[in-house]
Image: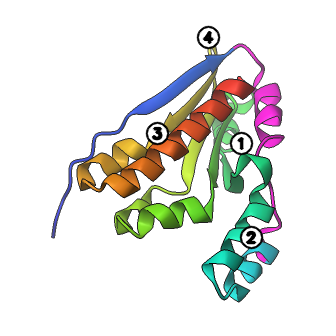
Amino acid sequence: MATRQIDVQRFSITTSKSFKDFVAGLESRISHPDLMAFRKNISAARTDSELQKIVQAATGSSALMEFTRFDLGEVLRKELGSRAPQSLRLIVGNPVIMKQMVKFVPDAGSYAPVTILVDERPDGVLISYDEIASFLTSYGNAEALQVAKDLDFKVETLLTAVS
């Protein structure tokens, strides 16, 4: 059995936009492909070039897509009712970017796709993102780390623009 200590850097930004407006802005900038069709197309791809075309078509100009979401606020409302803050965890990514990291550091698959957390706080809507480069630094692979830094930049630029 092995245990690895990993320090994580969290990017956070608070926006004065409403929860609903921020989420709508984010949703408008990431793609939402039909995941059943997407998985079928990925499975049918025979080459890396075909895979890249499928992913590019699914992710659009942001190069990011939503894989799933967890409405944490909905669960909180079961106990707290209307007093519960809205909270949403989005799982977002790009399979080609993930592949570029995993081929150098297999453990990168534990961190990609990435999580974006959007939740209401007393001082506004807080958006949090754990930087994937911080997860991968301890593995010491320059290639995977550069891909992770590029992904972090892409996600943080998107979150800043939407906020």
The quadrant the C terminus occupies is: top right
Residue 130: mark in rendering: 3
Give the residue type at disc 3: Asp
Q: Nearer the viewer, mark 3 or mark 1?
A: 3
Tag 2's secondary structure?
Answer: helix
Asked if one can make out residue 97 in the rendered structure from this viewpoint, the answer is: yes
Give the residue type at disc 1: Glu
Mark 4 vs 2, N-terminal side: 2
Mark 4 vs 3, N-terminal side: 4
Place of residue 140 in the rendered image (x, y in percent of width and height, measured from the top left): 24, 53
Residue wearing tag 2: 53
Q: Compared to 42, does 23 lie above or below?
A: above
Mark 3 vs 2, N-terminal side: 2
Q: Quadrant of residue 101?
A: bottom left
Q: Compared to 30, does 157 lie above or below?
A: above
Q: Badge 2: how crowded within 10 Å, few (<14), some, or many (20+)?
A: some
Mark 2 vs 1, N-terminal side: 2
Residue wearing tag 4: 123
Magenta segment: does it hold 33?
A: yes
Q: Badge 3: how crowded within 10 Å, few (<14), some, or many (20+)?
A: some
Place of residue 149 in the rendered image (x, y in percent of width and height, measured from the top left): 45, 43
